[in-house]
Image (spheres, coloured by chain):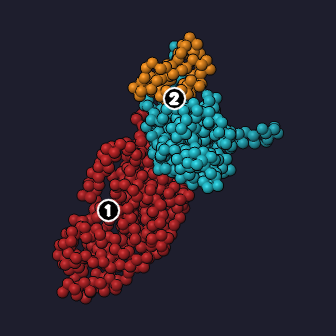
Chain colours: A red, B cyan, C orange
């Protein structure tokens, strides 16, 4: 199949349609708007539903309703909008409803900025609403990977009956890259065993619900969900490594930021600094085992992020203080340059000698 | 002898958790009777949000989705857009529909979302123990308006049907009560009309049912009925605020040169 | 011939049915409590029951069955 030049947001939207997404509910927000605009054009022509809701809160609850019938459904937003959606996300997780949620991150807190950022790592991996629950978080670093991960996201959501988030950012959303759409056999799972889609008077009624008024019942339900999470941690964690085998310093970076880090690694190697890159593709489950393997010969780790240092917490937890972990990054919508990262590598390399 | 009145099939054969004399049970039964009579139980999905009636998912035999507080119209929108072949209804209280869920309610109505909304208005937050609701009457004492609701400070009650009847997407906005058997019969007729609107694709139908809350009003069920009649109905007049079926019929008559009534 | 019967353990004794009966033959009995500890409604004079089902329509708990 031939490659086409597309904006990240539009490629994501196209991939969602090809992955069999039947409904989209959203609310305008920069820098994800092209995604909804693309779907507003395409969904009606291709047998899908596009609806612009009155708020992010309403949009995520429409996702709960459509997903509750067993229909492939998604929503997209950007950071402040995801905060609004967090109530609904908690209910969706508590009701075991599959769906895809896209966050094209921007700067925060508050209204923040509309520039690219990775400030929602904590929100995505730890704080997407009240209660004990997890979301699978996928973090692409190219327009092509956005496409690939959208397909995987829908499949994972249905396989484990839970919401999956694709964590993009203003950089990936806005930039254009050549992209190839793989042949996708849009095969949705059979959801008729649990979905609220009409009894047809053939079975007991299905209840899509997150309320368990008896504490013991709720605990049992949450524990059952955590058994599923354990399987996911075992089977679905994913990462990419680059020149890590002999690296003295391994950079950890995700999403768009990992590409800046990769340039820095190449520049460092040219100077004789043995640097490598470890890039988590799944932020939850965090690829702990892969990180341990990638850093077995390293003397130090450098977490590079477009925030004040959020993923670094998970890196440190995974490494269990075995080696020092340092941080460099920019925040507020500022993108770090490869040279800034290189400067930090030089400093650490000097320190290591 | 043959049984002429018993529990409808669409209502599960379980004991309702509601307090003695709470009229939720009557309204549940009316919805279930309409579902039975229209033969749509197998193709119906109910949406019940937070409130006393959140457990309605245990009471209706059709598939059910529990919604966050106030969000039932949005959840129902999702169901209906994904599966237009299903009959979808929400069952909401006044705090849910007219306070936290105002945006969801108004926008589902103005979109002409093809759903049925059963709005149970008893002027209080029952589940949390009787706090002031958007529909609490002026002067009414609740746990958060201990000196009586003072509109100058707490604002005025919302007349939901009047408000929604101004929206083009609303097909039916009607207020009924369950204080007497004739009113109960009228309520059922209106619920049926709402579901028929959905079948016909007419748009958003809301049936507001003035209801009671013996526990939080601090009255016996019989005294509640009296208060409903003497205080609530005069403040919230019963009647049809909008009915597109009626409007269409009148338009037809006009077109034929007859007098519209 | 008509018969009104109360599902003993479903009745909550709210008395709403007693307000609905046109013959005024529905009342609360004060002899036996059900498993919820409630004195339940009953028909005081079966011979007068016309099976209009108004008591059943008023009952919030589907605790009344009417036969005719």
The residue drawn where x is 45% and y is 71% is: A109
| Image coords of residue B101 (percent x, y) | 54, 52
Instruction: Give the letter of the chain under mark 2.
Output: C
What is the number of the mark on residue C14? Answer: 2
Q: How many marks?
A: 2
Snapshot quadrant of residue C51: top right
The residue drawn where x is 46% and y is 75% is: A115
The residue drawn where x is 36% and y is 75% is: A308
Snapshot quadrant of residue A170: bottom left
Q: Are marks 1 and 2 in contact (CB under 8 Å)?
A: no
Q: Which residue is disc 1 drawn over?
A: A284
The residue drawn where x is 36% and y is 51% is: A161
SS for dot 1:
strand
| Image coords of residue B159 (percent x, y) | 64, 47
The answer to whether residue B194 is above or below residue A227 is above
What is the number of the mark on residue B115? Answer: none
Of tags 1 and 2, which is closer to the observer? 2
Q: Quadrant of the N terminus of chain A?
A: bottom left
SS for dot 2:
loop
Q: Is residue A235 left or right of residue B163?
A: left
Packing grade of label 1 (10 A; few <14, some 14-19, many >=20) is many
| Image coords of residue A9 (percent x, y) | 46, 68
Q: Residue furthest front?
A: B147
Q: Quadrant of the C terminus of chain A?
A: bottom left
Task: Let me know if marks 1 and 2 both belong to one chain.
Answer: no
| Image coords of residue A94 (percent x, y) | 38, 50
Q: Is residue A282 left or right of residue A109?
A: left
The answer to whether residue B159 is above or below residue B185 is below
| Residue placed most toward the observer, C15 or C67 | C15
């Amino acid at each position: 199949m031939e490659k086409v030049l597309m904006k990240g947001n539009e490629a994501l939207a196209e991939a969602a349609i090809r992955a069999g997404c039947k409904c989209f509910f959203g609310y305008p927000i920069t820098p994800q708007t092209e995604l909804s605009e693309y779907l507003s054009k395409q969904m009606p022509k291709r047998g899908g539903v596009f609806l612009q809701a009155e708020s992010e809160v309403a949009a995520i609850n429409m996702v709960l309703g459509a997903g509750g019938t067993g229909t492939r459904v998604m929503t997209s937003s950007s950071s402040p909008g995801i905060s609004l959606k967090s109530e609904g996300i908690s209910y969706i997780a508590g009701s075991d409803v599959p769906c895809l949620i896209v966050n094209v991150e921007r700067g925060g807190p508050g209204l923040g900025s509309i520039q690219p950022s990775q400030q929602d790592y904590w929100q995505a991996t730890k704080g997407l609403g009240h209660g004990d629950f997890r979301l699978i978080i996928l973090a692409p670093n190219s327009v092509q990977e956005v496409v690939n991960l959208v397909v995987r996201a829908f499949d994972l959501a249905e396989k484990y009956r839970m919401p999956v988030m694709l964590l993009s950012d203003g950089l990936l959303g806005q930039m254009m890259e050549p992209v190839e759409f793989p042949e996708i056999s849009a095969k949705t799972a059979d959801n008729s065993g649990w979905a609220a889609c009409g009894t047809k008077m053939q079975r007991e009624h299905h209840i899509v619900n997150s309320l368990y008024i008896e504490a013991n019942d709720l605990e049992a339900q949450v524990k059952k969900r955590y058994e599923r999470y354990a399987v996911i941690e075992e089977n679905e964690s994913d990462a990419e490594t680059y020149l890590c085998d002999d690296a003295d310093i391994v950079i950890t970076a995700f999403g768009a930021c990992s590409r800046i880090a990769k340039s820095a690694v190449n520049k460092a190697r040219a100077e004789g600094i043995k640097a490598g890159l470890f890039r988590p593709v799944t932020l939850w489950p965090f690829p702990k085992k892969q990180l341990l393997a990638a850093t077995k010969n390293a003397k130090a780790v450098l977490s590079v992020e477009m925030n004040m240092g959020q993923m670094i917490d998970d890196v440190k937890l995974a490494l269990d203080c075995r080696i020092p972990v340092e941080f460099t990054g920019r925040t507020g919508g500022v993108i770090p340059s490869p040279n800034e990262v290189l400067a930090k590598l030089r400093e650490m390399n000097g320190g290591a000698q | 002898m043959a049984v002429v009145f018993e529990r409808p099939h669409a209502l599960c054969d379980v004991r309702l958790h509601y307090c003695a004399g709470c009229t939720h049970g009557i309204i549940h039964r009316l919805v279930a009777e309409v579902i039975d009579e229209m033969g749509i139980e197998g193709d119906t999905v109910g949406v019940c949000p937070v409130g006393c009636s959140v457990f309605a998912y245990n009471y209706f035999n059709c598939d059910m989705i529990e919604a966050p507080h106030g969000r039932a119209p949005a959840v129902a929108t999702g169901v209906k857009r994904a599966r237009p072949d299903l009959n979808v209804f929400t069952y909401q209280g006044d705090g849910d529909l007219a306070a936290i869920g105002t945006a969801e309610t108004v926008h589902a109505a103005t979109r002409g979302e093809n759903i049925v909304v059963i709005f149970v208005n008893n002027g209080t937050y029952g589940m949390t123990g009787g706090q002031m609701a958007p529909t609490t009457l002026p002067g009414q004492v609740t746990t958060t308006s201990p000196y009586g609701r003072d509109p100058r400070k707490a604002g005025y009650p919302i007349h939901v049907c009047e408000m929604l009847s101004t929206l083009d997407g609303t097909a039916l906005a009607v207020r009924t009560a369950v204080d007497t058997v004739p009113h109960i019969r009228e309520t059922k007729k209106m619920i049926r009309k709402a579901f028929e609107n959905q079948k016909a694709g007419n748009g958003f139908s809301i049936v507001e049912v003035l209801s009671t809350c013996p526990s939080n009003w601090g009255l016996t069920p019989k005294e509640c009925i009296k208060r409903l009649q003497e205080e609530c109905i005069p403040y919230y007049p019963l009647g049809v605020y909008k009915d597109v079926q009626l409007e269409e019929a009148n338009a037809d008559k006009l077109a034929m040169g007859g007098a519209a009534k | 011939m008509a018969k009104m019967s109360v599902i003993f353990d479903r009745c909550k004794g709210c008395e709403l049915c007693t307000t609905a009966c046109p013959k005024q033959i529905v009342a609360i009995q004060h002899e036996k409590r059900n498993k919820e500890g409630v004195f339940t409604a009953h028909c005081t004079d079966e011979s007068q029951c016309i099976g209009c089902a108004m008591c059943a329509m008023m009952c919030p708990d589907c605790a009344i069955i009417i036969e005719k």
